[in-house]
Image (spheres, rainbow, N blue to C red):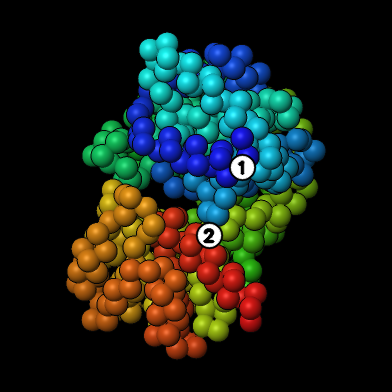
Amino acid sequence: MNYADAMNYLADLARFGFNFGLERVEELLNRLGNPHRYLKTVHIGGTNGKGSTAVMLASILLQAGYRVGVFTSPHLHSFTERYRINGMEITPGKMAELVGELRPYMETMVAQGFEHPTQFEAATALAFLYFYREEVDILVLEVGLGGAIDSTNVVLPLVSVITNIGMDHMNYLGNTIAEIAGVKAGIIKPGIPVVTAAEGEGLAVIEQACREKDARLVLVGRDVTWGHIANTGGGQVFFIRGRQDTYRKLFLPLLGRHQQVNAVTAVAAAETLIEAGGAVNPEAVRKGLAAVNWPGRLEIMCKDPVVIIDGAHNYDGARSLRRALKEYFPDKKLVLMIGMLGDKDYAKVLSELAFNARVVVTKPDNPRALNWQILASEAGRYSSEVYLVEDIGAAVAKALAVASPDDVVCITGSLYMIAEARKILLNKNEKS
């Protein structure tokens, strides 16, 4: 099996959709020798910021001298992005080899009467097998969706992290903050410490789960605090008062105050690992945060006009994006290019981002894409200048065409859409 065959095979598994539960992945992992049981993990769930927190923690651990595996999803440009060791993606050849190895196990399962594993279950099993064989010291593992019945929830981690709780994936997780928090709190294990930056009703659910499972809770904002110092052209400077140390004048090459919260959460997790015997020092925290690379999150792609790409695909993400735009570009007018999936609360997202903006509505290349005419109609409630451009490349061109040099162009919504737009802009930058 070559890489193209492997990707086609994994793509075909999407036909099994979302089929929650741990039975299939546990059966598959059992046939593979249960590699996950031999891995030391940090399990990271939450509504927003899971991936950012994961890569920040991984960068800190790398600077501390660990061989660090990271499993995140979804990807921007290549499936191989989901599997990294010390920042390096799995090679296409290794990816093809592992998919080829996995396939007969899944086919045998089906022949023996088991349900076929989903695409994400196969991807998760592949992750455990890969990182086990590569002998990583620690695996930073991002939850796919929810928590309790997500296929990553077969691990017994050193630390469980729940970044925050917001309204997203309501058709799968519940229609209230409490219901969603209950599902996400499913990654909390008896006696295993928990780090969270959740607030309000979501935090109350997490606190109750920790009490029931005798899991010590480290609360960001109470046990670990921070303060903003300054914004820079390429990031921000802040400090953290941790439980192990105080970290002064930390530089993070990502924009947005919400990324400070993610960084504090990552540091709190690193300090919790110290308490479990890990060797993380203040210099590793400093160097690790300064070295973070996480594309597609308030990423500045061009400067004339300023073009930003951000995967704000839900209401809380849109609120964070709006705050960042006001903070970094207070005097600039906004050109918003947006395309969303159908299971998102598009009305609330537009209420945050589309007011008085020129809006270009496009369509993500995904079967779950929201009807773009509906999105455009909703955008018209907040903007008198709305353009419908179905092709993503043409939509990027339109957004740039209607922007003046003093405007800021923000491309946001579905990660599938911003990935395509990012590729177009990278090619444009290379040519110029």
**Where residue 346 sits: x, y (%)?**
27, 58
What amino acid is found at the position of numbered circle 2 in the picture? Gly
Of the 4 image quadrants, the one containing the N terminus is: top right
Q: Which mark is residue 296?
A: 2
* Residue that mark 1 sits on: 3
For marks 2 and 1, give the one nearer the viewer.
1
Of the 4 image quadrants, the one containing the C terminus is: bottom right
Name above or below for residue 337 compared with residue 56. below
Q: Nearer the viewer, residue 59 or 93?
A: 93
**Where residue 415 sits: x, y (%)?**
45, 55
Mark 2 or 1 closer to N-term? Answer: 1
**Residue 397 as seen in the image, left or right of residue 193:** left
Residue 401 visible to the viewer? yes
Name above or below for residue 281 compared with residue 32. below
Spatial distance from mark 2 to mark 1, Cα to Cα?
A: 25 Å
Q: Nearer the viewer, residue 273 or 135?
A: 135
Picture quadrant where residue 181 is located: top left
**Where residue 128 sits: x, y (%)?**
60, 27
Q: Residue at image x 78%, y 47%?
A: 283
Q: Residue at image x 50%, y 42%?
A: 8
| SS label for mark 2 | loop
Q: Residue at image x 75%, y 35%?
A: 67
Name above or below for residue 30 compared with residue 385. above
What amino acid is found at the position of numbered circle 1 in the picture? Tyr
Q: Nearer the viewer, residue 183 or 150?
A: 150
Q: Nearer the viewer, residue 298 or 241?
A: 298
Picture quadrant where residue 146 is located: top left
